Amino acid sequence: MKIDKIMSSIGAGIGTELEGITEDHSGPRCPVQSVGQWLDNIGLVQYENHLLSNGFDNVQFMGSNVVEDQDLLEIGILNSAHRQRLLQAIRLLPRVSTDKDTELKSIVMKSSCTKRADH
């Protein structure tokens, strides 16, 4: 019976604390763009079909170091100045954190904490 009282008091506390919190739904901090909008912003909209037809259909994931010069060449972007402009713009995209990134950070943190404890 004590558990029921504890659980209900926890639930009541959470409910009252959350009542005052309001979320800002005015939009994400980094607006999500289509590949076409992003290319238009950098002045290379003519490559939209090249990217889309080769699986580069999400600007958010292009920022995760998945695109290299050779990739752009292979999908038909032959102008080296345009490839360099695309790669430079890709490097400016926010990097998407994956579960593996989070797992790796966790392992590194545990390792460094263990080393400190040993000394």
Image (cartoon, rainbow, N blue to C red):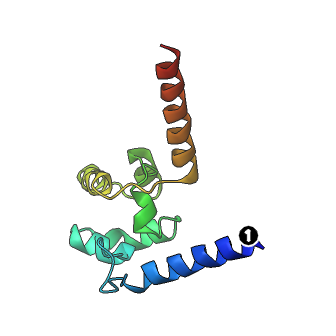
Query: Residue drawn at (54%, 24%), measured in percent from left and top?
Result: 114
Q: Is residue 11 left or right of residue 94?
A: right
Position above or below: 21 against 111:
below
What SS does tag 1 mark?
helix
> For the view shown, which residue lies furthest in the front direction?
2
Residue on which the image places disc 1: 3
User: What number of labels is visible?
Assistant: 1
- In the picture, residue 85 is in which quadrant? bottom left
Q: Quadrant of the N terminus?
A: bottom right
Position above or below: 87 against 37:
above
Position above or below: 115 against 102:
above
Q: Is residue 32 left or right of residue 1?
A: left
Q: Is residue 100 left or right of residue 16?
A: right
Query: Residue drawn at (54%, 33%), measured in percent from left and top?
Result: 110
Query: Residue drawn at (48%, 26%), measured in percent from left and top?
Result: 112
Q: Position of residue 109 (x, y in %)?
A: 49, 34
**Nearer the observer, 6 or 15:** 6
Q: Position of residue 26 (x, y in %)?
A: 29, 86
What amino acid does circle 1 point to?
A: Ile
Q: Residues within 10 Å of mark 1 (few under 14, many from 20)?
A: few
